[in-house]
Amino acid sequence: MTITDTAPHTTSPVSERERLVTAARALGPLLRDNAARAEADRRVPEENIAALREAGLFDITKPARFGGAEEDFRTFLEVSLELGRSCGSTAWVTTLSNVTSFFVGAYPESVQQDVLGADPRIATCGVFTPTSTSVRVDGGYRVTGRWGFASASHHASWANVGIPLTNTDGEAVGAASAWIPMTDLSIDNTWYVAGMSGSGSDTLVADDVFVPDARILSVTDMMEGRTASEFQDETLYHSSLVPVLALVLVGPVLGMAEGAYDAVLSTLQKNKPIAYSFYQRSIDAPSTQLNMAAARSLIDQARLLAFRGADEIDAAAAAGRQMPVVERARARMDAAQAANLCREAVELLLNVSGAGSFAQVNPLQRIWRDLETSSRHAFINLNINQEIYGRALLGIDEQVSPFV
């Protein structure tokens, strides 16, 4: 007896995460083609920026009320990873734009309208360090300062920058994060580096710029999950800040490691020989097999650590709680460890690929330089993060960083 299935066949709807990750993967050929140009021009090509914008990849963390995806940090990480496979600088710019756009959800609706109302698909940029001066005036602050390493600044419409909070006597009483339109800032051309050149991480400059109180949010409040938004049910914007700041940096690094692995594997599959040896195919050499296995395992370990961190951030936010100190410290530790594992993996891959890896026409040398640079961002400094985590584990209240 034959049973015929007469039920209608339906296609499962594609989730927003799947859509964004698929869109990031589809941009791979364009980003690879433009990677050398990004490095030479010291900024991401406008062709890339237009494609990212069209695909909604600057909108991952923006509020859904403005047409944003308002997606979680696992999605954020997966998108950054996919972009990083093809161009580390483009992935970095997209990552830093999305994390500063995440901040906007913590501000009052009036500020959200200021930043996103005219064009919700804009890119944003920012530097959290308060390398500026601020003078308290009626209704806000007058800010003068310079903020270095401002990735995405050449493509942004607004910047979120760190400022000191002062009282009317000029005494520092805290730190804050402030939104300033790029029309009130200039960019000093300072980004001349060996790696991540294409990120265009030049220096933002403010000269006596007025910033109204509404556009200023205490860093302490942000770190403790207190937002000024009228939409307190938007759980994404209550995500634990310090783990977020560390985690997002790992996405592009993971992607670069995956890109290096893909490139070496592709070369090996073309029966590349080992020079000055009897191995006509490198894949037949035990050293190649061992190094490839070790590199793959290191990248897999990095992924496990990073995505565990993303899932913990997302779970805590969904539950309406801030992660406790030990969990926050572990998140910084895990992010740093993941970046370090990626560096170790790429070193093994370079051993397999050999001296030819460093030819200027070989993308491996750029991936290596980009990864070596980006993975040393201060927020994922392995030794400092080990200290932070060790102190948290041992119950030592005095920390080595305010960002825990």
Image (cartoon, rainbow, N blue to C red):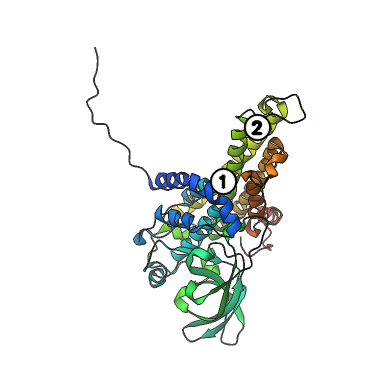
Nearer-the-camera pick, 85 or 79: 85
- Residue that mark 1 sits on: 255
Q: In this view, does 36 lie to the left or right of 109?
A: right
Q: Position of residue 34 (x, y in %)?
A: 53, 51
Q: Which amino acid does label 1 sit on?
A: Gly
- Residue that mark 2 sits on: 293
Name the outermost residue toward the right: 276
Instruction: State which quadrant residue 135 falls in.
Output: bottom right
Mark 1 is surrounded, within 10 Å at the Cα level, by few (under 14), some (14 to 19) or many (20 or more) other residues, namely many
Q: Earlier in the sequence, mark 1 or mark 2?
A: 1
Q: In this view, does 146 lie to the left or right of 225?
A: right
Q: Position of residue 161 (x, y in %)?
A: 54, 70
Q: In which quarter of the image is the C terminus?
A: bottom right
In the drawing, what numbered circle is on residue 331? Answer: none
- What residue is drawn where x is 60% and y is 57%? 40
- What residue is drawn where x is 44% and y is 57%? 50
- What residue is drawn where x is 40% and y is 72%? 114
- What residue is drawn where x is 56% and y is 51%? 35
SS for dot 1: helix
Q: Position of residue 338 (x, y in %)?
A: 62, 47
Nearer-the-camera pick, 73 or 398: 73
Nearer-the-camera pick, 206 or 268: 268
Q: Which amino acid does label 2 sit on?
A: Ala
Instruction: State which quadrant residue 270 falls in.
Output: top right
